[in-house]
Amino acid sequence: MAASGLPRRLFLQGVAAVYALAFASLYTQIPGLYGAEGILPARRTLRPQGKGRWRQLWETPTLLWEAPQLGLDTAQGLELLSLLGALLALGALLLRPLCNLFVYLLLWAAYLSACQVGQVFLYFQWDSLLLETGFLAMLVAPLRQPPRHKQTPQSGLAGASPHEALPFWLVRWLLFRLMFASGVVKLTSRCPAWWGLTALTYHYETQCLPTPASWFAHHLPVWLHKLSVVATFLIEIAVPPLFFAPVRRLRLVAFYSQVLLQVLIIVTGNYNFFNLLTLVLTTALLDDGNLTAEADSGRCRKTPTSAWPRSLLALLALLLECTVYGLLAYGTVRYFGLEIDWEQLAVHSTTTFTFHQFSQWLKMVTLPTMWLGVVSLGWELLTAFWRWTQVRGWLRKLCTAVQLFIFGTATVALFVISLVPYSYIEPSTHGRLWTGAHRLFGTVEHLQLANSYGLFRRMTGLGGRPEVVLEGSYDGQHWMEIEFMYKPGNLSRPPPIVAPHQPRLDWQMWFAALGPHSHSPWFTSLVLRLLQGREPVIRLIQNDVEKYPFHKQPPTYVRAQRYKYWFSHPGEQSQWWRRQWVEEFFPPVSLGDPLLDTLLRQFGLQDKSLPRARSSGNALAQALRWIRKQLSPLEASTLLWGLLTAVGAIRGMQALLGPRPPHASPVAKEEKHRLAPKKDCGPAGKAAAPTPDNCSGSVQALRRKK
């Protein structure tokens, strides 16, 4: 029953930071993606259907329905939401009074509102993950922050509300679902690269936006790539059940393994805020003892008779740890055939189980993992009830009982809802799930309170990385390539470091290259905007318009070619990539071309009506345009890194200049040391200072002495 006040605080600050990055990144791209001259204008997504106001809001939950009341169109309303969301998130991160339930509710509502009009550019798993995490943060956050002088340095059991640990347990359950499902789907997809343990020999080269470190990782020995895949399966499938282990050290091992995986992904790939958000989720594996100098094992014992039960528990915990580590090691060696080659100093590995065997194993363990969640949640509920029984005062007990009932019911309901998307990993288990859970999930599915996850399901580009290269021409004979800021294009340009920014057009260009252009209808709209020379769309490709080859005059013709890219070989001077032409991706078209008009009409992308004119004298609209004008010269990744630097500087100043906890006088310290019991206070026989929880008698004696 270790307290988790510090991890909860760290979690809330982490969520606020991710919100700030997500809103700021989205804000820089709104005109080009969703403006009146953008690729997919947002105004097309919100059209009143003659339904009641509240029913319309429930079916399409977005605050942007109210944008016309402010004299703004949908895109301007989205800009306002993004700016306010970023400012609110920074406020929750830097100002203690703003770290409360209502602020996190507004942040979640704002991001949900954006996702409702975001269309294909906001259909990523990390957007769903941020919504689900943001809703949990709303439950974890306090109704209001207590005054600083009433808050202890670390939240002990005595000062914590009984319900506080319940919503935070859902964060741990979310992390389990995310990691376990991400590991399982790699094998259920029957991808030959994952089954052959060769996925990482392709991954660094074929991922959407590599980093410079990806080039070096790609050229590591093949045996090390295969061993890394084995480690990935171990961390994503075998380790997550340890999130619910009763032994702190096992949870700590699980924490460090997840952190290691996420840090390596951050170094070798630009995955925007996704890995940062996953790191934030790992705080649910910690407790106050992990984040403070004092650990529970160093506390004094109340009576000498408690020594033998504590020693017995420590011995059982040690046996459990050794058993778990032994099973993990044995299973890894057996099921992945690990063999050490001493001559070549390598570790060889191969998959020794079949798809049928894995499917049977998955069918056998999916339901027990759900019951593992039920047992763990049941323990949290019992612990919360026990803490409630320790509350003194009938009025406070009544208030905490109401809070416990509300948050306990919400926790159980969200857990039941989450079982539905989690069970997607095993169809037969999904079919046997309680029908009430299906109905409950269907009712709130559009709110994205619980989602299914499965990252890197299949490895793409096994024969070379497919890449779409846009070209423009004035005469249809001489073509110039249109180079993007972030995605691969120029063979001599190193891969950039983009994270935590997500260039959403570059990401969709990567998905478009995996199939025909008809599978990506937005691409036709992109071609149209380039032919029209729309600056907001051009800024998505090159923020510095002068670097865009057709900045003086739009091209007469635009076409797209599909290439295959590979990393260059070591020793090739000034070359990061090699490429080979494959085929024409999109035929040459010009404005008024029948083919272009047919495609626009087929995909419903024609502008049937002009956007409704808004008053140019609207003060709010003018303010939004002024802010946009000031920020548009800054590249998005530069803006986000500047934001991070500023936040770090402010937090550093707060730590240096903020109020510090009062220190005891030398006389009090000497008296406390004299009154401290001489008995050994830990498993190793070390003495520890008395704490309010278990040495209250010494503290009372000290007070009487004073």
Image (cartoon, rainbow, N blue to C red):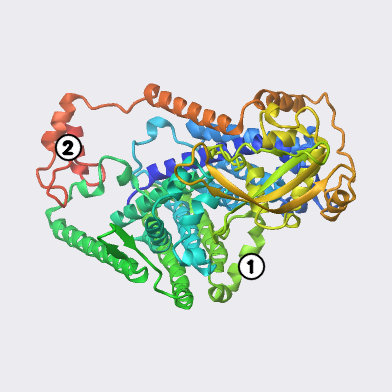
**Reading the chain from its start, which is encountered first: label 1 or label 2?**
1
Q: Secondary structure at mark 2?
A: helix
Q: Position of residue 102 (x, y in %)?
A: 57, 40
- Crowd band around label 1 with a 10 angstrom C-alpha radius: few (<14), some (14–19), many (20+): few
Q: Which residue is mark 1?
A: 439
Residue 699: name its quadrant: top left
* Horizontal side, residue 635 vs residue 256: left or right: right
Q: Position of residue 316 (x, y in %)?
A: 22, 64
Q: Which residue is mark 2?
A: 701
**At 32% from the left edge and 28% from the top edge, which residue is drawn?**
661
Q: Amino acid at mark 1?
A: Arg
Q: Position of residue 224 (x, y in %)?
A: 37, 56
Residue 304 visible, this angle? yes
Q: Amino acid at mark 2?
A: Ala
* Horizontal side, residue 344 vs residue 599: left or right: left
**At 84% from the left edge and 31% from the top edge, which residue is drawn?**
614
Q: Quadrant of the C terminus?
A: top left
Q: Nearer the viewer, residue 309 or 75?
A: 75
- Crowd band around label 2 with a 10 angstrom C-alpha radius: few (<14), some (14–19), many (20+): few
Residue 394 visible, this angle? no
**At 65% from the left edge and 34% from the top edge, which residue is drawn?**
28
Indicate whether 197 appears above or below 73.
Answer: below
Q: CA distance from mark 1 to mark 2?
A: 59 Å
Q: Are marks 1 and 2 in contact (CB under 8 Å)?
A: no
* Horizontal side, residue 383 vs residue 621: left or right: left
